[in-house]
Image (spheres, grey):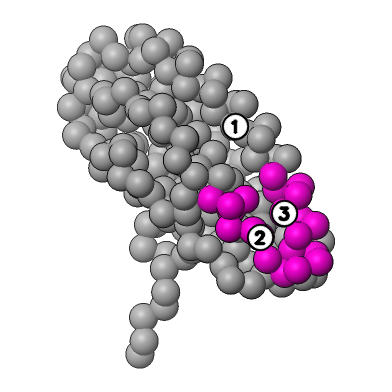
Amino acid sequence: MALSAPYPTQLEFHGDRHIDRWRPLVQWLLAIPHLFIANVLRTLRNLLILISFFTVLFTKRIPRQLFDVIAMTFRYEWRATSYALFLHEDYPPFDFQPAAADDGVDSHNVVSFTYPEELSRWQPLVKWLLAVPHYVMLFFLMIASVIAVVVGFFAVVITGEYPEGLRDFLVGVARWSLRVQAYVGLLTDEYPPFTLSATA
């Protein structure tokens, strides 16, 4: 039996579990410049997705340049978020290279997208509706994530180690959320899997 191809949107995290105990207290503060830029990029992304909506309706494609910039905004946002949540210690780069494939600048985070040569013309009209079951699941996963961050905070402050299960859970939720955003944001027509796993 042939193995299925991996999902067109991939998020991977590689990092040491050891985190200096002081970092949860201040790392969110150090991340503010990145989080501000990520917020600006999110606004840009929403505008580009709106433009992409019409290009898909009329041409069944997203121009490669638009796709690459949208991919960059998602990548930058995850790098900023993973640092703010003290999942690793290395300060993320101010990297704005538009590319679907990860450029490898951040050794902890790999976020890559497969460019679709053609997209369905009608799916942009209903993707938001088809994604409702995912939104329901993500609502509960986000609540669990808040609890995981709080527990991780105290675990790192007390032990200097981020619990592997908690960190994997947070990364998995981010991966799930990114796949849903990529689907609704017209980067792929492939329906996202209901899983935290990277292997889907």
Q: Which residue is mark 3?
A: 52
Which x, y percent locates residue 76? 47, 35
Q: Amino acid at mark 2?
A: Ile
Nearest to the observer: residue 92 or residue 180: 92
Which mark, residue 62? 2
Q: Residue at x 68, y 32 (%)?
A: 43
Q: Earlier in the sequence, mark 2 or mark 1?
A: 1
Location of residue 184 (image quadrant)? bottom right
Q: Which residue is mark 1?
A: 41
Q: Residue at x 76, y 47 (%)?
A: 50
Q: Is residue 120 magenta?
A: no
The quadrant of the picture occupied by the C terminus is bottom left
Callout 1: 10 Å neighbours few (<14), some, many (20+)?
Answer: many
Which x, y percent locates residue 123? 75, 67
Nearest to the observer: residue 107 or residue 87: 107
Q: Is residue 149 left or right of residue 39?
A: left
Q: Start and end of the magenta stretch?
A: 48-68
Element class at badge 3: helix
Residue at the outermost bottom position: 1
Q: Label 2, label 1: how many angstroms apart (C-alpha)? A: 18 Å
Element class at badge 1: helix
Q: Label 3, label 2: how many angstroms apart (C-alpha)? A: 6 Å
Marks 3,2: beta carbons within 8 A: yes
Q: Label 3, label 1: how many angstroms apart (C-alpha)? A: 16 Å
The quadrant of the picture occupied by the N terminus is bottom left
Location of residue 6 (image quadrant)? bottom left
Q: Earlier in the sequence, mark 3 or mark 1?
A: 1
Element class at badge 2: loop
